[in-house]
Structures are given as C-alpha cells and as structure tokens.
Amino acid sequence: MTENLPDTEDISRETIIMFLNSKGDDRINLFRHAAEVKKKHVGNKVWLRGLIELSNVCAKDCFYCGIRKSNTKVKRYNIRDSEVLEAARFACENNYGSVVLQSGELQHDKFTRRIEKLVKQIKGLSEDKLGITLSCGEQSEDTYKRWYDAGAHRYLLRIETSARELYEKIHPSDQIHIFDNRIVCLERLKKCGYQTGTGVMIGLPFQNVTHLADDLIFMKNLDIDMCGMGPYIEHSDTPLYRYKNQLLPIHERFDLSIKMVAVLRIMMPYINIASTTALQAIEKTGREKAIQAGANILMPNITPGKYRDSYSLYENKPCTGENAGDCLHCLDIRMKLAGADIAYGEWGDSLHYGKRSKAAQADLQQKI
Ligand code: SAH
C-alpha cells in the first residue's frame, strides 16, 4: 500500500475507510506516512497546554459523560479563582506556553464573567506569556466574543460525533442538547476569530468506521484549526453503560483512535492535533503512540490534585493522584523517547489558522 499513499490532502472516503480498517504492514505504513507528513509540515515539536479543569458543575446530561448533571454520585466542585491562578502561575514558571481552561457546561452571566476575569488575570500574571485555550461548551456569540476580547485565542468544542442520528442517540432530546446548535457554535467561534478546534469520541455504541470516516470529512469541510479526539471509555454511572457489551474491545478503540489521528494528519497537515488523556487511560504509552502517528499537542493535567478525582469524565482517568510537577518531568522523557521535543515557552499556534486567515485577507483585498 505504501506506493498508494496519497501525498496530498485529497483523500476519498473509500481510502479513509481503507486506512481505518488497515492491518499489518498497511497499518504501520499509515502511521509512518502520517509521521512524515507531520515532520514536513509542522515539525517534530510538541506543544504543551496545561489543563485546568476548573469546575465539574454541568447543566448538561450527555449519556456518556461521568460529570453529567444527573450523576448524583459525583462530588461537585468549583476550583477557587486563587487556585486557578496558582495553576496558571505554575504553568508559566515551568514554561508550558499555554493553558486550557475546561469546565462543565454552564450558560449564565456569572459564569461568563468568571471566565472573562480569569482569562484577563492569567494574561496579566503571565505578562502575556501564556496562550489560553478555552473548552467551556456552547455559548452565545456575545460570550465567545467577550472571552476572546479578554485574551483567549483558541477554543475547543467537540462535535462528539458528526452523525446527527448518532448524536441524538447519545444525548437527551431537549433544548440544550441540539446537534445543529453545536455546529452553529463552531461557526460562531470561527467568526469571533478563535483558532477553532473540534473532535469526536471513537468507539461509541452504534458507531462504525463509516461514521468515523465521515467525522474526518466533517472536520476537513469545517476547515478546523485544531482537533482533540479520543476513545470513548464507558462510565458505570451513565446511561450508555448498558451498551458496554456491544462496544469494540478497548484496544481496538485505542487503535482506531491512533488511526484517526494519522489519517487526519494526512488530510489536514497544518492543524494542531492533541494526543488526548483518554489514550493514556487505555495504554500507558498511549499518548506517545499518538505523537508518533501525527499528533503534536499534549495537555498535561495541572488541576490541583485534590479536585482531580472528581473530574471523572470516564473511568480509569490517569494521573488523578499526582502533582503537576511529577507529570512534567516524566512527560519530557517520554516525548524524547517518542522522537519529539517539547517546545517549552512557545504558544504553538495552529499553522492552519495562520494560512486560513491570510487566505481570507487576500480574498477580502481582492473584493475591495
Ligand atoms: N463542557 C465542555 C467540556 C467537556 S469535557 C464542552 O462541552 O466542550 C471534554 C470532553 O470529554 C467531551 O467533549 C467529551 O468528548 C469527552 N468525554 C466525555 N465523556 C467521555 C467518555 N465517557 N469517554 C471518553 N471521552 C469522554
């Protein structure tokens, strides 16, 4: 299959499906090719995003997620602002380059103001050294704009699955879980000027390889700048748990996730692709495998230790008991072994975004 590997970004749906089903040498060649594409277009650096899970209070009731509103077994928390700033200071002092503020989904003025203030404070304390990514769910255009104006410049909002009928199966059917609204929000984010990221869960019940191929095409068509995707891991306190016997074996979900990363790298050579924590939950060296197959972003968890157990989106979430400092040291070694160098102190913005903005400007110039 090596000689058939496309060197361009135009891969047909059939080829994507073939890649996702590949085995043996074909599978190895896919990973190798993705690694070459990565090296050629974005290099072998890995950028860090210190992840701060600032609250697990969530208004949503997604059927797969451990912190869904109806899960009464979760101890709800809100990290104090001072602790968020302390974590950001830690990221700054350790040259992370960027932080991600992630939380359950809330849509009210107090929450909007809180995030706005935290973003400004992080910008201030780091003297603009830290880039800021937000992952705080669906919001109004006004809210996205306020957060952008405060200094956040990247936003991650996973579509979860781009197949409407599947999306509707894994979410309640009500006014706050609307597939189209998620797409509207992604458009809003782009309009506000964010480097916009999305992603999906891989190995969901009722999901097949064709859905996953269409997810990749969806991301390509949406012209995203960043992607964070990873295996679905069942959580016993969620409604989807009842389908646990119908799932792909966990290692197949893992393998499919790495293939998804590889194919997306080939399709969108200049985007940022995260090697997600869920991969590490399955295999100890899971994140390294994704880096070797095309990912270039790592999100070490820097949430204060005492809260980590409560941000249990899925079971066996790794590193919940560790201090942030321990993780950074082991990551550095792990990345070197995987042939990648952590780019300390750099924002590591999406090159795709730069190209997209330039193209839009040129287009505008022509129209004027
Ligand atoms: N509220 C924010 C952040 C959500 S948590 C938002 O909506 O953007 C981050 C991601 O965790 C989700 O987007 C989802 O893709 C993932 N996740 C939730 N439950 C999961 C599970 N059981 N297995 C794997 N990933 C899961």
Image (tube, rainbow, N blue to C red):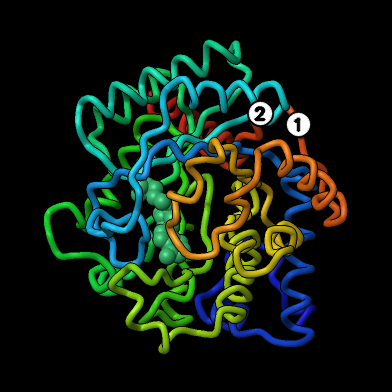
In this view, the residue in front, 31 or 327, is 327
Q: Position of residue 153 (x, y in %)?
A: 48, 29
In this rendering, position of residue 205 left or right of residue 138: right
- Name the quadrant containing residue 189: top left
Q: Earlier in the sequence, mark 1 or mark 2?
A: 2
**Mark 1 Cα within 10 Å, few/some/many (few <14, many 20+)?**
some
Q: Which residue is pictured at 62% across the width and 79% down the height?
A: 251
Name the residue that disc number 1 marks.
Answer: 344
In the image, which disc is placed on residue 97?
Answer: 2
Residue 282, given in percent of the width and then of the height, sits at 62, 69
Residue 46 visible in the snapshot: yes
Specify the label residue 17 is tagged with: none
Q: Secondary structure at mark 2?
A: loop
In the picture, the quarter occupied by the C terminus is top left
Nearer the observer, 204 or 88: 88
Q: Residue at x 72, y 26 (%)?
A: 95
In the rendered image, the vertical position of residue 272 relative to residue 263, given as above or below: above
Identify the residue at horizontal 50%, vertical 76% (top origin).
Answer: 13
Residue projecting furthest to the left: 175
Q: In the visual, does 6 lie left or right of 12?
A: right
Q: What percent of the width, then of the height, locates residue 131?
A: 57, 26
Q: Amino acid at mark 1?
A: Tyr
